[in-house]
Each structure stands twice: as C-alpha cells, then as structure tokens.
Image: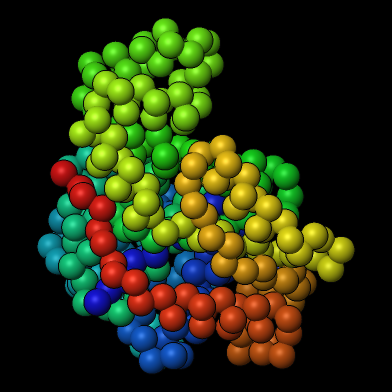
Amino acid sequence: MVHIWPIGGGKGGSGKSFLTSSLGRLLAGLGKKTLLVDLDLGSANLHTLVDVPYPEKSFSDFIRKKIPLLEDVVSETPVPNLYIISGAHDNLDIANLPYEQKVKILKAIARLDYDWILLDLGAGTSFNTLDFFLISQNSMFITTPEPTSIENVYRLVRAIYFRRIRHYFNATDFKALEEEVLRQFGEGSFNNPDCIMEVIKEAHPEKNLLLENDFNSFKFKLVLNQLRKHDNIALGSQICKIIEKHLGLQVDFAGNIAFDDRVHDAICQRVSFLDRYPYTRTAYDLRELSKRIAQFTGQQLLIRYT
Ligand SMILES: Nc1ncnc2c1ncn2[C@@H]1O[C@H](COP(=O)(O)OP(=O)(O)OP(=O)(O)O)[C@@H](O)[C@H]1O
Ligand SMILES: [Mg+2]
C-alpha cells in the first residue's frame, strides 16, 4: 500500500526540501521503496539534495507529453531504494496548470508502485499547491519557530480547509453560501469556519456529512524545524491546539527538528547531512521523525478527486 505524504509550509526556507530529502533517505534506509516528487515547479531543487546534480528527465517531460508515463520520468539516486521525479528544467508556472492536467498528475502519482511517496510542495497557497495537498489524507506541514512562518502555516491549513469546502459547491452555490453566511453572521464571518459550517449544516446537510467525513479523515502532521536551544519546545503542540481551536481541524504534532549550522555546510558541500553528521541532535530528531512516520500504517485513503 502506498503512503503519499505531501510536505509543505506557508513560508519559503522553512526546510521543506531538506526535510523531504532527509525523510526520503531515512525511509529508504528502513527498506521502504521511496519516491520523492519535486512539485515545487519553477524553483525545483530537490534533486541537488539527493545527489542527482543533472537530472536527465523531469516532470515537465510528462506534462508536455514528451514522456507519456509518469513512471518513465523517475530517476534513480545514489541512495538504494530512493528515487526522484525531478522538477528541474521546469519553467512551468505551477499556478497555470489547468485543472484537468492537475487531476491527471494526481491520479498518475497515486498509481505509482512505491511504499512511500513524498511530495515536496512550493511555499504559498496557490490553488494547485492546495490541491496537491488534497490528494491524500496525510499532510505534513513544516514551520520554523518564527511568528511569520507560524502565521503562514496557519494560513495554509485554513486555505486547505476552504479549498475543500469550495470543492463541493459550484460557483453559484458558493456565492449563495457566502451571502447566507454574511446575512446570518455579519461582515467578516465568511472567514470563520464555524459560521460557514453552521450554514452548510442547515442548508446543505448532505454536503455537511461529506465535509465532516473528509475533515475527520485528514491526518495532518506538524513539524517544527530549526528549533534553537532557547526556543520553546512546547511551541509545536501549542500551534496544533490553536489550529484545532480556530479551524476545528485536528493537527498532530510530529516533532521538533533542532537547528544546526552544519545543515548549511552539508548542503553547500553537496553531501548528506545525515551521513556527515549522524551524531548531532538534528540527525537524531530526523531519525525519530522518520521512525514515527514509518510506523504509520493507517489505511491510505485518496480523497475523492473528480
Ligand atoms: N534544521 C535545520 N537547521 C539548520 N538549517 C536548516 C535546517 N533546516 C533547513 N535549514 C536551512 O534552511 C535552508 C532552506 O531549506 P529548504 O531549502 O529545505 O527550505 P524550503 O522550505 O524547501 O524552501 P523553498 O520554499 O524556498 O523551497 C537550507 O538551505 C538550510 O540551510
Ligand atoms: Mg524547497
């Protein structure tokens, strides 16, 4: 059974690609056939972090139909069991992917034969990034302890929430929903999930059931990266509580990853941080995270995508 984990965060530089490549190496080391997919089209660089400096094929070959099968754009890496679909050479603006193409990509990814597929997503909340999150009930969000990063991750989770609601309404019904929420609860209330759900429950009970089902099946995990010694180690759990309180979505805290200057050194030297500095706190944290993630054997449910 394939486990698909979109990995994202609201802010650039929070460590999504470093974490994706590190978890990929570790899962592969546990004997899991693991595929990394660089969906940060436009600024793809995941290949560099897994020692594939010049990928010969990339995602755009599939999108531009030069290579018809997604499995044929997979490249091997020097790490046994670890494979990558590179986003290099893509001058594609991810925001411009038409809906049908996106669905085709998501379905093709879901059909690939791997134990683990980790999707490295771009920062921000473009519709396509949000939809790539919704391929799977699992999602991993990365933030650093900085307030700006936390704010962005909160925004990202909220945007995913709204995107899911939008999915069940056509444009006219969605407009009517907005008007009804504003009529009942006043200005600004369409930003409030409780108000929206209240109206959906009343006016569209069948949609409410589907949405509740979706939201209950999401398994959101939060990772706090680049934690420095003086930072609050309970911050990650606190962020999860805030998200649950304000959005009603359960996000489990998956762990802290310590900050270490040598991450930068390893990336500059193009060596694996885990191999070069295995006895650091950061490497320990990454190993613990990978073990927790690898234990996850819950049924993989692909969210309906039509
Ligand atoms: N745990 C860590 N300790 C120290 N530095 C880190 C850590 N994690 C990431 N970094 C630093 O942050 C930089 C950005 O990381 P990374 O490229 O993974 O971020 P990103 O979220 O993928 O960014 P982008 O959105 O631009 O793709 C890395 O080059 C590295 O120097
Ligand atoms: Mg990145």
Residue 281 placement (x, y as % from top left): 73, 81
In the image, is 69 to the left or to the right of 90? Answer: left
In-image side of 80 versus 262 (left or right)? left
Q: Is residue 207 above or below residue 268?
A: above
> For the view shown, which residue lies furthest in the left direction?
68
Q: Which residue is found at the position 80% from the left and 65% from the top?
A: 228
Residue 122 visible from this viewpoint: yes
In this view, 287 is above or below 305: below
Rendered position, 164 above or below 61: above
Instruction: Please tell me in which quadrant of the rendered image residue 106 appears.
Output: bottom left
Quadrant holding the N terminus: bottom left
Query: In this image, 208 relative to 103: left or right?
Result: right
Name which quarter of the figure residue 116 lies in: bottom left
Q: Report the residue that reaches farthest toward the right.
A: 230
Residue in the image at 46% along x and 90% along y: 29
Tally of numbered discs? 0
The answer to whether residue 63 of the structure is visible from this angle is no
Quarter of the image holding residue 24? bottom left
- Quarter of the figure that contains the C terminus: top left
Residue in the picture at 65% in, 82% down: 283
Residue 262 pos. (x, y %): 74, 77
Q: Which color scheme did the rendering employ for the protein?
A: rainbow
Q: Is residue 206 left or right of residue 225?
A: left
Q: Residue at x 29, y 13 (%)?
A: 176
60 or 258, which lies in front?
258
Q: Position of residue 54 (x, y in %)?
A: 41, 73
**Front residue (pair 17, 75):** 17
Q: Position of residue 107 (x, y in %)?
A: 19, 58
